[in-house]
Image (cartoon, rainbow, N blue to C red):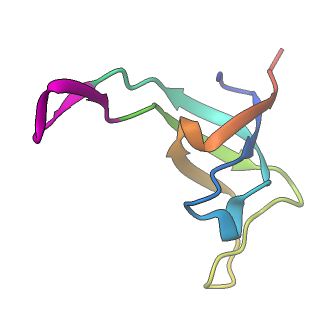
Amino acid sequence: MNVGDLVMYTDEENYAEWFYGRLARVKSYSNCPNQFRAPELPEVCLPFCTGHVRVEWCAGAVPYMNSGRGTTHSDFRCSAFEVIRAAG
């Protein structure tokens, strides 16, 4: 995933009611390679963060939440999106 990519929100569990299937353009992206240990399984390293992406929703795809107001930008983990078309 890179800045400028066209992405679709594909997380079916979190915020799906408002965002699922909506298209957006990646405005910023940061990879978060940190690994954290699960306290109950200290020998197992679990990925805590899959990276962060800030998107600008495409015209006509602006999600409206409970407040009835639309949002033009959102921040989510990268795994909530699928790249539809790479920039360039």
Q: Main secondary structure of the magenta part?
A: strand
User: Foreground residue, 86 or 48?
Assistant: 48
Residue 17 point in image, percent of width and height: 68, 70
Residue 17 visible in the current orientation: yes
Q: Is residue 65 left or right of residue 8?
A: left
Residue 86 point in image, percent of width and height: 80, 21
Residue 41 lies in quadrant: top left
Residue found 29% across the figure and 24% down from its top: 34
Looking at the image, residue 34 lies above or below residue 63 = above
Residue 25 point in image, percent of width and height: 75, 38
User: Foreground residue, 46 or 41?
Assistant: 41
Looking at the image, residue 61 lies above or below residue 49 = below
Residue 39 lies in quadrant: top left
The magenta segment = 35-48
Numbered-mark total: 0
Q: Where is the N terminus found, in terms of image quarters?
A: top right
- On whether residue 40 falls in the magenta region, the answer is yes
- On whether residue 28 falls in the magenta region, the answer is no
Q: Is residue 31 left or right of residue 66?
A: left
In this view, the residue farthest toward the bottom is 67
User: Foreground residue, 40 or 6?
Assistant: 40
